[in-house]
Each structure stands twice: as C-alpha cells, then as structure tokens.
Image: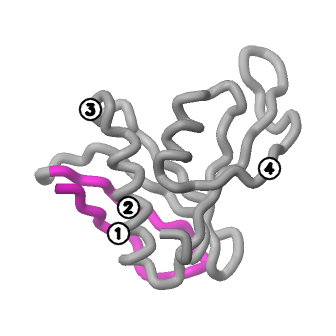
Amino acid sequence: MLSLERREGPQTHLPIFLDMKRDELVIGQILAIPISPNSYQVHLTDVMKMERGFTSVYARQAILKGFRDIPELHHIYALLPKHNRLAIKVAKDCGMKYEGIIAKSFLYGGKMEDSLIYSIIREDI
C-alpha cells in the first residue's frame, strides 16, 4: 500500500515535501513547489527505487493522494523533456493532459531541448 507522509507544516507559500512509502520503505519523494495559491509544480524523485512497470501506478496514486490530502492543491503540472517518451507515457497514464510546449527550456546532451507541459486539475480526477 502506498502512503504519503508530509514533512513540512501547512504553509502554502513554501514547498511541500512528501515521502512515498510502501510497507514503511521510502520508494520515492514528491516535491510540490507552489506557483500560485492553489497550483503546484510537482517533482517525482527517486523513481529508480520503484519496481519496473509500476511507475505509472505509483504516480497515479500519488496524484490522487495529493489531491485528497492537500486541500489547497488544485493543479499539478509536469514539465517533461520532449524526448523522454517514458515520462510522457506516465503522465498520460495518470490522466494528465497535454497543454503545450516550452521551446529550448533545458540543456540536454550539450544542446537546448524543448519541454512539454502536461497537467491535471482536481476536477479531472
């Protein structure tokens, strides 16, 4: 069973750190950075600890728990490297929708690459 444990208090102007645990073992972390009063950019980290084939399952559970456990959370978005097909598949599997592109937004392999924006809002879950 996946559980999330909030590490910081309910300050909406500060980042929220969550540990994703399964059977008391931390399998990943979520960093939610506020970008407006009800919208957070969410980073899923340490996904290498997750079992192969379960990244989408854990990410979807994390999104659902995030909306349920963080009342001020309304919008989650992901900035994904255009070339990272696995990350795009995970976002789609989680119900995130394509919103647009940010041209030349990060350095990869010595050159600037595009990012794709995927998001989900509370009403879409």
Give percent across and percent down for residue 41. Answer: 62, 60
Q: Quadrant of the N terminus?
A: bottom left
Q: Earlier in the sequence, mark 3 or mark 1?
A: 1
Residue at image mark 3: 51
Q: Earlier in the sequence, mark 4 or mark 1?
A: 1
Residue at image mark 2: 18
Give percent across and percent down for residue 120. Answer: 59, 63
Q: Residue at x 72, y 31 (%)?
A: 82
Give percent across and percent down for residue 53. Answer: 32, 31
Against 26, residue 109 (above or below) is above
| Residue 21 lies in the magenta-colored region | yes
Q: Amino acid at mark 4?
A: Gly
Q: How crowded is the residue under tag 3: few (<14 C-alpha within 10 Å), some, or many (20+)?
A: few
Query: What is the C-alpha distance between the residues marked 2 and 1?
Result: 5 Å
Q: How crowded is the residue under tag 4: few (<14 C-alpha within 10 Å), some, or many (20+)?
A: few
Front one among 59 and 28: 59
Q: Which segment did they paint magenta?
A: 1-22
Q: Do labels 2 and 1 touch, CB within 8 Å? A: yes
Q: Do labels 3 and 4 touch, CB within 8 Å? A: no
